Image (tube, coloured by chain):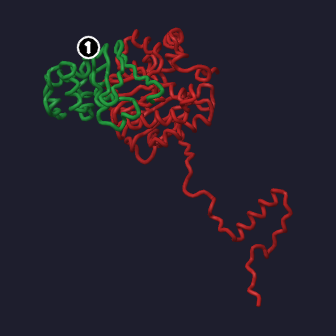
């Protein structure tokens, strides 16, 4: 699962919908892999305003990546700076969580990830 | 035509054998590809987008999303959800590019608000009309799904869901659930009244770049007739004033139809009586 996708995932449990702790999900015992993906600058510029930067910073520290700057780059800055574009592309699109768990900060539910597929099926008492 | 959703649950029906059969059948591949292209045409995406594929299965439709050339606004990045582990296993073996999730669409869409540019679903949402346990109901599952989908799409986003409705009641049930969630909804039917009829539920969040209502989506497309079955303004009811001549005539007519003895209508019917001293 891409780090980009993790930035959009929230806990699926009904009672967590109203809590701010249910986002972002915290990776635990995560095994990472790097996939080669062709860079797509337009897509990154497109998704940039939707990325929750604070959440991305938390995730990247938790996964052991170097700390990100405090503020997200603007679309113009990103388009001009090829190095930053490449770094962001590597972090968001190429890094994959292959095995591990995602933990909700509110209810503590653990979503297992196997072979890159996260299991979001809920037992009926949590739906 | 047999309907698998009538006999088994989706995750039980699509076991390893069934999933492989489904993915390797060239007939199914062609149909799925044609439907995905049609759905993309309806989504009308101009630049590389972030798309949700609901009921992605083995990634037949997702593959097409990743393969859109740059000149046509691609390639898109997609995230797929499916309830069948076997289908996802086939997708893994085929090495698809999107992220996969094992999730039940009837339990909602676990993404935060405004995540996706668009959503696509090929031959999946008819499964929502069946409830497997007494704890869930089709209406509840539909509501949960459409509410989640509405929230996870960005304002101005679109969703296209191709599905196989069993009958008109099911069609009505699905559309009204979508409208209740807040979508602008319309049904597009290709080859209606033939065996190959394909139904697409087109959903918009906000104005979605169309002028006016949902019919703006198909504006400029060839060979599409717009049939608007929405109620327009006031219906005939309520216009007849109680006690008026028209009302009396209507009542007399009703009584006559019931088989009661009704006095013949004359020029005095419904006339005010003169004040008597």
In this view of the protein, which residue sits in the foreground, A88 or B216?
Answer: A88
Does the rendering let one see residue A86?
yes
Q: Is B57 situated above or below B73?
A: above
Q: Which residue is mark 1?
A: A32
Q: Could you tell me residue B157's position as x and y percent?
A: 37, 37
Q: Eyeballing the image, is B117 above or below A120?
A: below
Q: Give the chain ID for the green colour.
A: A
Q: Which residue appears at 31% of the width and 15% of the height? A: A100
Whether residue B15 is situated above or below residue B47 in the rendered picture: above
Relative placement, left or right, of A32 versus B15 is: left
Q: In this picture, is A84 found above or below B267?
A: above
* Element carrying mark 1: strand
Quarter of the image with the C terminus of chain B in it: bottom right
Quadrant of residue A78 within the rendered picture: top left
The subunit carrying tag 1 is A
Residue lying at 41% horizontally and 25% vertically, measured from the top left: B53
Q: Quadrant of the N terminus of chain B?
A: top right
Q: Residue furthest right?
A: B261
Q: Position of residue B154 (x, y in %)?
A: 35, 37
Camera-nearest residue between B245 and B6: B6
Compared across the picture, whether B123 is left or right of B272 comes to left
Q: Give the colour in which the image draws chain B.
A: red
- Percent position (x, y) of residue B134? 57, 29
Residue A99: image quadrant is top left
| Res B130 seen here | no
Report how many numbered discs are placed on residues in the image.
1
Q: At 84% from the left edge and 68% from the top edge, which residue is drawn?
A: B264
Which residue is pictured at 22% across the width and 28% down the height?
A56
Residue B135 point in image, percent of width and height: 54, 30
């Amino acid at each position: 699962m891409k780090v980009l996708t993790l930035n959009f995932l929230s806990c699926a449990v009904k009672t967590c919908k109203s809590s701010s702790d249910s986002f972002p999900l915290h990776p635990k015992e995560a095994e990472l892999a790097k996939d080669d993906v062709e860079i797509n600058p337009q897509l990154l510029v497109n998704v940039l305003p939707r990325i929750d930067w604070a959440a991305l910073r938390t995730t990247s520290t938790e996964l052991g990546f170097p700390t990100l700057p405090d503020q997200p780059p603007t679309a113009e800055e990103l388009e001009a700076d090829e190095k930053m574009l490449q770094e962001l592309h590597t972090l968001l699109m190429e890094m994959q969580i292959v095995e591990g768990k995602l933990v909700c900060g509110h209810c503590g539910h653990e979503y297992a990830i196997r072979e890159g597929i996260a299991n979001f099926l809920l037992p009926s008492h949590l739906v | 035509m047999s309907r698998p959703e009538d006999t088994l649950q989706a995750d039980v029906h699509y076991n390893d054998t069934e999933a492989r059969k489904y993915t390797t059948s060239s007939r199914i591949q062609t149909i799925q590809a044609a439907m995905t292209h049609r759905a993309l045409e309806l989504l009308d995406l101009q630049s590389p987008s972030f798309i949700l594929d609901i009921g992605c299965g083995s990634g037949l439709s997702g593959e097409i999303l990743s393969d859109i050339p740059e000149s046509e606004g691609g390639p898109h990045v997609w995230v797929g959800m499916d309830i069948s582990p076997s289908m996802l296993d086939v997708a893994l073996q085929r090495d698809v590019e999107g992220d996969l999730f094992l999730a039940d669409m009837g339990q909602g869409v676990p993404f935060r608000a405004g995540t996706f540019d668009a959503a696509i679903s090929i031959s999946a949402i008819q499964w929502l009309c069946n409830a497997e346990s007494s704890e869930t109901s089709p209406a509840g599952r539909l509501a949960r799904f459409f509410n989640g989908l509405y929230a996870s799409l960005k304002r101005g986003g679109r969703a296209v869901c191709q599905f196989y409705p069993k009958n008109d009641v099911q069609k009505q049930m699905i559309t009204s659930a979508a409208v209740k969630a807040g979508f602008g909804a319309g049904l597009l039917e290709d080859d209606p009244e033939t065996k190959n009829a394909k139904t697409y539920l087109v959903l918009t969040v906000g104005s979605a770049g169309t002028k006016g209502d949902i019919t703006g989506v198909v504006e400029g497309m060839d060979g599409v007739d717009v049939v608007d079955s929405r109620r327009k303004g006031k219906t005939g009811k309520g216009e007849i004033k109680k006690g008026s001549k028209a009302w009396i005539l209507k009542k007399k007519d009703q009584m006559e139809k019931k088989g009661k003895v009704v006095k013949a209508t004359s020029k005095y019917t419904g006339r005010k009586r003169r004040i008597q001293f």
